[in-house]
Structure formats: C-alpha cells, structure tokens
C-alpha cells in the first residue's frame, strides 16, 4: 500500500490533507512548523511525523503546499537527506514553472520525480475533494499519482509537460484577480453614481459573464475597511498578499511585453482596495 506524506498545512494544505486522511488510501504522514496545524489534521486521521525528513523516510508520494520557491527548495533539501529513488514530490503551490523544473532536475539526480499539481477552488472544495487540479507531466506520472489526484480533485486537467500546470495556474489567477478588480471598480462606480450595485451583479449574472468564484467574492464589495477587524482582517490581508505574489509571478510568465506587465501591475496595486483593506482612493 502506498504511504503518503504532506508538508505545509496552511488553509489549503490542511483541508487537502484532512480529506486524504479520511480517504483510506494509506497512511498519511504530515509535518508543519506550526504545531496546532499538525494537531488539527492528526484529529482527522493523519500521523504526525515530527520533521520533513521523517516524512521523506516513510512516504512514497510527498505532497507540498508551501508559500514560495524558497520553501519548496527547503523541502527538497530534506528529501535529499533521504534520497529515495522513485519517490514522487507533488508541488501544489503556486510558483513559477522554472521553480518546478528546477525541482525536477534536483530530484532526478537521485532518481526522484517531480510533478506540478497546482490547485484551485478554495478550502471548502479541498475539504470535499472537489478541487480543480492543473497537472504538469501527468502522462508520465505513475498510477498512484493519478489515484491521489482523483482523491484531491473532481477535475484534473492535463496542462502539458512538467511546469505547465504552474503556468496554467498563474494564468487562471490573472483572470480571477482581473475579474475581482473589475467587479470592485464597477461596484464603486455604480454606487457613487447613485445606482444599485446589486442590480449590477444581476445584470452581469444574466449576461452569463459573472463566474461563480466572482459571485462568491462579491460579498466583499459592500464592506468598508473599518468593517474588517480581528481574525477576519488577518485572513483577508493574507489573501491580499497571496494575490500580490501570484500577480508578480504573472509579470515573469512567458516574457510578456511592457504593456502587459503594466496592466498586471495595475491590478496588483489594487489588491488591497479590491479586498477592501483600504479604499480605492488610498490605492
């Protein structure tokens, strides 16, 4: 039976790992630097490994969902201490395709394998195994990887070779944040003109151009910065930081022309106002 590992138990990682632990595919060993995150997922059936190296020693397939490229490199440093031939690393993080390919090259030196399996859909979808997964190198992945991805997601998209899943995720994020920004700008413009922002959403929905994700986000649009307090503000500020990071990756994707970079950076600068931590006037 396959043994699974998971490193990085943030909001997405915890939800994915909790669902995996309940799927009874095999043992799930986990590690995160924040102990309370580990404890929560252990309650769902996972096993605390104590360190990344302990995960590497036991797991045949290791998943990781960590914030950025340097954190992925640190995970591979720990895998290299064990250097198990045939071991698979699945990278669920949103990072540049070059980061995925560099990870692949490193693990290949001891016979390991890397595939990008970037995820979208949110925490609730992760808890229910309903994520969309953008996979790179899927045609070369062993059956156990296909089985695992089918547990994590209801839609696994073969994006192309290793690294292509990361590129697709960045592209999807650009479309998502651009629509969020458009929704915020349109909402504020209609409201400032004495119109009904709810009618704006109704019109957008009726034309078929309002996506489900943006409709879910639209609940933020009526909030003032002063209404974001405590843990809710912290959560939203974390999301702002993720958006800014992901859009920065988009400025480096495929050597875009300056005009494209300018548009992406404009959306990036608006992220705090889009998520209502500041006003549009302050952006």
Image: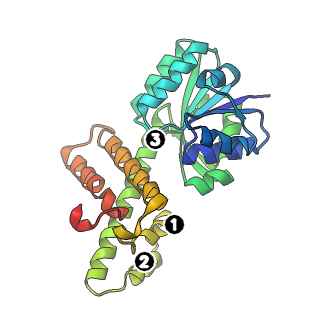
Q: Which mark sits nearer the N-terminus, 3 or 2?
A: 3
Does 190 sit above or below residue 236? below
Does 198 sit above or below residue 125? below
User: At 51% across and 66% down in the image, what residue appears?
Assistant: 212
Of residue 108 and residue 51, the one placed in the foreground of this image is 51
State yes or no: discs 3 and 2 in contact (Cβ < 8 Å): no
Q: Which mark sits nearer the N-terminus, 1 or 2?
A: 2
User: For residue 212, which numbered disc appears in the image?
Assistant: 1
Instruction: Identify the residue under disc 3.
Output: 94
User: At 36% across and 85% down in the image, what residue appears?
Assistant: 196
Looking at the image, the residue that sits furthest to the left is 258
State yes or no: discs 1 and 2 in contact (Cβ < 8 Å): no
Q: Give the percent coordinates (x, y) of residue 158.
A: 56, 41
Instruction: Identify the residue under disc 2.
Output: 201
Q: Is mark 2 on a helix, strand or loop?
A: helix
- The CA distance from mark 3 to mark 2 is 29 Å
Q: Can I make out residue 224 in this image?
A: yes
Left or right: residue 243 compared with residue 36? left
Q: Is mark 1 on a helix, strand or loop?
A: helix
- Looking at the rendered image, the disc whose residue lies closer to the viewer, 3 or 1, is 3
Left or right: residue 279 compared with residue 15? left
Of residue 142 and residue 274, the one placed in the foreground of this image is 274
- Residue 39 sits in quarter: top right
Of residue 221 and residue 34, the one placed in the foreground of this image is 34
Of residue 86 and residue 6, the one placed in the foreground of this image is 6
Q: Give the percent coordinates (x, y) of residue 108.
A: 53, 16
- The CA distance from mark 3 to mark 1 is 21 Å
User: At 42% across and 29% down in the image, what residue appears?
Assistant: 70
- Residue 24 sits in quarter: top right
């Amino acid at each position: 039976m396959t043994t699974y590992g998971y490193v990085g138990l943030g909001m997405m990682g915890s939800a994915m790992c909790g669902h995996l632990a309940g799927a009874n595919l095999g043992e799930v060993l986990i590690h995160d630097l924040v102990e309370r995150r580990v404890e929560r997922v252990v309650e769902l059936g996972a096993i605390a490994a104590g360190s990344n190296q302990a995960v590497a020693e036991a797991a045949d397939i290791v998943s990781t969902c960590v914030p950025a490229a340097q954190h992925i490199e640190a995970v591979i440093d720990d895998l290299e201490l064990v250097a198990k031939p045939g071991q698979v690393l699945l990278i669920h993080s949103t990072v540049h395709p070059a980061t995925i390919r560099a990870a692949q090259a490193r693990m290949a030196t001891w016979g390991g394998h890397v595939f990008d399996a970037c995820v979208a859909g949110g925490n609730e979808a992760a808890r229910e195994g309903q994520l969309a997964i953008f996979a790179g190198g899927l045609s070369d992945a062993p059956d156990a990887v296909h089985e695992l991805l089918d547990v994590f997601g209801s839609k696994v998209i073969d994006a192309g070779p290793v690294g292509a899943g990361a590129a697709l995720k960045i592209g999807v994020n650009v479309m998502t944040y651009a629509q969020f920004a458009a929704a915020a700008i349109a909402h504020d413009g209609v409201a400032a003109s004495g119109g009904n922002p709810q009618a704006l959403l109704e019109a957008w929905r009726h034309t078929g151009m309002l996506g489900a994700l943006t409709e879910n986000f639209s609940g933020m649009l009526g909030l003032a910065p002063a209404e974001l307090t405590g843990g809710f503000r912290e959560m939203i500020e974390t999301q702002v930081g993720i958006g800014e990071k992901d859009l920065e990756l988009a400025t480096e994707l495929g050597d875009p022309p300056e005009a494209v970079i300018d548009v992406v950076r404009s959306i990036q600068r608006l992220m705090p106002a889009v998520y209502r931590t500041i006003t549009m006037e302050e952006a």
